[in-house]
Image (cartoon, rainbow, N blue to C red):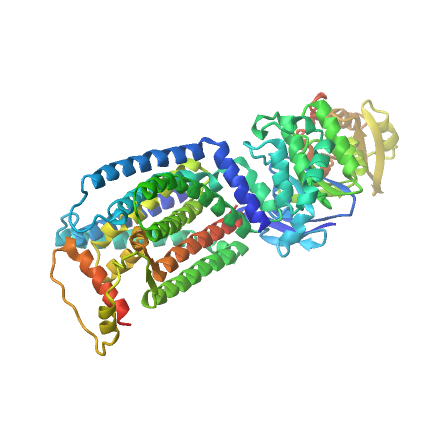
Amino acid sequence: MTRIFNGLAWIGTAIVFVAAAVRILGWADVIPVSARLDQYAMYASWAGLALVVLYSLSQWRQIVAWFGGRNARYGTLAGISVIVALGILVAINYVSVRQNKRWDLTANQQFSLSDQTAKLLGDLKTPVKFLVFEQATGFDRFRNRLGGYEYASR
Amino acid sequence: MIEVEHLTKRYGSFTAVDDISFTVEKGQILGFLGPNGAGKTTTMRVLTGYIPATEGRARVAGFDVVEQPIQAKRRTGYLPETPPLYTDMTVRDYLLFCARIKGIGRGDRVTRVNAAMDRTRVADVAERHCGKLSKGYRQRVGLAQALLNNPDVLILDEPTAGLDPKQIIETRKLIKDLAGDHTVILSTHILPEVSQTCQRVVIINKGKVVAVDTPDNLTSRLRGSESLFLQVDARGADAASELGALEGVTGVTVSERKDGLTALEVNSQTGRDIRRDLAAAVVNRGWGLLELRPMRMSLEDVFLTLTTIEPDAPAAPAPSTEAA
Amino acid sequence: MSNTLAIAHKELKGYFASPIAYIVLGFFALMFGFFFYSLLLFFDRGGMGGQSVNVNEQLIRPVFLNATVIFLFVLPMVTMRTYAEEKRSGTMELLLTAPLTDLQIILGKFLGAMGLFASMLALSLIHMAVIFWRGNPEPLPVLTTYLGMLLMGGCFVSLGLLISSLTRNQIVAGMATFGVFLMLWVINWIASFMGPTTQQVLNYLSITDHLDDFTKGILDTKHLVYYVSFITFGLFLTARSVDTERWRG
């Protein structure tokens, strides 16, 4: 009996993965997916999910025991600490991107703007929007230069 | 020195150690006896702080192994079942490394390492790589590592496993010498080792403590004999002395005399099944045979499941009476 | 601190007592030399043409950018045995029952691996010496490049430590590490399939992108912060992994 349940759980998981893969790949246009196939995939993923839930319910006794134990407490503690740490680091990075300091150490200051340009940008009162039209491959130069403008205008 | 209170360790649904409690006084040697898989290694791992317990607490030298791990570990020396050697290091380098991570200062390291090597007689392989040592030497280097920081508590998991008889004798002598200065817990499944080296024994089976006693008490309980409980209607005759005269019977004690019925405990030689003779004797005398059953000695049951074979001694004879 | 150094010392000794250190150093020497040689010839013939004959821009920077590919192959070999081997040979029990904190063990292993990585990078100093002797490059951008590569390597090493701590099997650790590195390497390509905000986030996560400014000679705090955060998080996860391993049995 348990073996059947286990098998169902695996099948359910497999279905969910396949269906999700089909949907994602279709949406990213990596493989051609018709609207019908997409719908089937959605139904399939719900069905798979239902199977997994059924399996979990059949294991309720184990789940209850596990949650009571010391292990679960340590586990949730570890999980929370990871999320908190991640949150802190993301926040730090977010701030650092906005408030970065930059030093150009090349002899000719080739990656920095000329003093005149810098002064001009520093004195800007209102936001200025640049629209660049270029092939994707040539974007980098503009991105770098505009990034430099943005930094200098702070 | 060592206090274990209601220690339980569960791996998922499997309980490796189930509510065990014991203490070890300073300077004592405690033997931890039990069949393989009984939970000896798990208990030791909890005591050394390697694994946290699911429930209960353990204290070494007054420090809780979970709350104050560093202080507890500083006072502990541990030799696991497989000595933890770095195969690409020489013995001396390995011991110097162990000395360093156990917090021994630079000045003392070399002297301590030399002392430990002398004590465990591994000085002659000091420059050999750990990977190239024989089993006996590995065990001794492992023991040397455990002794480095002169610990209050020594925890040894099967310290004589895999050694030849001469090495076993040496190791046991070494352990006995260590008592007094150190408190020792050693685990084994070899009975005679326990009686020779330990002052107290904890017997553990399937995760539970089965007995805590001195080796003498245990062996006398063991060396006892087969015991049968007998209830007869002897119609006035002296059942005890008559049955006591039977061949194979080593002793008879009357446990109760009531309503004309006699309850007796009949001891026989170990390994000798006298149930049939006894029954026949009772019936032939015209007495009423009311009850005949083996008396369970739970300790014996435990030892019956042990393979208590000394490496150089013949196997203990298997008793022929299986519990009915 | 002494404990951390003791462990780092042990790790380094272990590396150099086994073939790993020599494979790593040899492989890097070979590949870097090859890149250097090819790019030197290319540079000699006028290179990309166009604007500058700047040695830094045309030679040093491309050499190092190409060399980072070597990290992809070499660093898994460095990190795969750090935890997996200890668990397999039972010496983990020694470390975890000694009066060491988990942090000391992790930092020690990290420093040990970084030590090997740094020795590997140091081989390229020979090539730099040649350029400086015969040419006239700017020293500061070269320094920032080395800093960037050390930090980038640090990210990979911390990830490698994490993966090694999750398994007993070195080979599995090595291959999984390589796989993860590869994914991070091509994250830009993956990003191009996504919507604009996801794209920005994924591009920010790209380890190679952050190296760019370092190789140009630019010191930008946001890259420093990113690399340090990455390394910190990697080591933090490793700490959690070692901790949970204890009571998972």
Residue C152 in the image, given as x and y percentages of width and height: 37, 50
In which image quadrant can residue C198 be found?
A: bottom left
Residue at image coords 41%, 56%:
C228
Number of disc labels: 0
Residue B174 in the image, given as x and y percentages of width and height: 76, 33
Q: Is residue B209 visible?
A: no
Q: Is residue B14 visible?
A: yes
Q: Is residue A107 above or below residue B169?
A: below
Residue C203 in the image, given as x and y percentages of width and height: 27, 56
In which image quadrant can residue B230 be found?
A: top right
Q: Is residue B274 above or below residue B74?
A: above
Q: Nearer the viewer, residue C150 or B323?
A: C150
Residue A145 in the image, given as x and y percentages of width and height: 21, 62
Q: Is residue B212 above or below residue B223?
A: below
Q: Is residue B92 left or right of residue C28?
A: right
Q: Is residue C20 left or right of residue B48?
A: left
Residue at image coords 51%, 56%:
A74
Residue at image coords 48%, 57%:
A78
Residue at image coords 19%, 57%:
A141
Q: Nearer the viewer, residue C113 or C89?
A: C113
